[in-house]
Amino acid sequence: MVEVRGLSVVRGGRPVLEGLDLDVGGGVTGLLGPSGCGKTTLIRCLVGVQRVAGGTVRVLGEPAGSRPLRDRVGYVTQQASVYDDLGVEENLRFFARVLRTPSASVDAEVDRVLTTVGLTDHRSSLVRALSGGQRSRVGLAAALLGDPGLLVLDEPTVGLDPVLRRDLWEVFHAIAGRGAAILVSSHAMDEAERCDRLLLMREGRVIADGTPAAIRERAGAADVEGAFLRLVGEAS
Ligand SMILES: Nc1ncnc2c1ncn2[C@@H]1O[C@H](COP(=O)(O)OP(=O)(O)OP(=O)(O)O)[C@@H](O)[C@H]1O
């Protein structure tokens, strides 16, 4: 679903990614790595908003950021990307219009994404009156409009309580179970265990790639956190 070849990015005059090769298939893939290693930069490349110095990025068979991908790639950024002074449903209707959802399908689309994220009871609430976790789910609902084949989530569970985090992970797996690929960046090592596959980055390179069990085994660690610390340490 994602094919990255020889990707190089320079930011602030410094190389951030250098000749990165990567494939992402179905299921939930976790993107881990120390702060500043290039996770958000890679995500920006996948959604087509990052200027690249070299290489190619193809998503669902198309160049990243190209017009056919507009409603086939969902992106939830670290910052809230919904309007505080609009209602939940109003936000979703607005984003459906931006995506040019045919007007006859908008009601069904809005109902579908509200059900997926469990917010049907809050459809009329103003976003600013919601809790942090509910607000995150409005952003996720907006990213699910158009039924994207790839969903990219940049630290989607920061600041959420353990129950909400667990619920959101159930939503991610349900979405992946319907055939979408999900790429989630995270610093939460307990969440890494929930991924089907992990990509561990350090200084713009992928230093480990496999299931959580395979990565634990390779590092000889009891959990992903131990494996992460060992592998990042080895690579330095
Ligand atoms: N707007 C910018 N201008 C210049 N350099 C930037 C900019 N944004 C990020 N960088 C640099 O690019 C590198 C990678 O940043 P990036 O945001 O991709 O890291 P990250 O792995 O997502 O970090 P974090 O886990 O802290 O979110 C860092 O060294 C950072 O200083």
Image: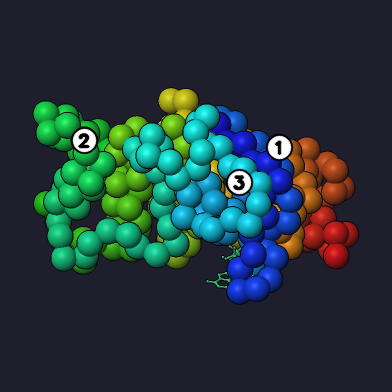
Which residue does the image show at 78% across and 38% down from the upper left?
214
Q: Is residue 8 visible?
A: yes
Which residue does the image show at 60% across and 46% down from the upper left?
30
Give neighbour class at mark 3: few <14, some 14-19, many 20+ (Cα, 10 Å).
Answer: many
Q: Quadrant of ligand 1?
A: bottom right
Regarding mark 1 in the picture, which secondary structure is present there? Answer: loop
Dividing the image into 4 quarters, which one contains the N terminus? top right
Q: Which mark is residue 211?
A: 1
Regarding mark 2 in the picture, which secondary structure is present there? Answer: loop
In percent of width and height, residue 225 lies at 72, 56
Mark closer to the chain start, 1 or 3: 3
Does 188 appear above or below 177?
A: below
Mark closer to the chain start, 3 or 2: 3
Q: Amino acid at mark 2?
A: Thr
Does 233 appear above or below 119?
A: below
Q: Amino acid at mark 3?
A: Gly
The residue tagged 2 is 101
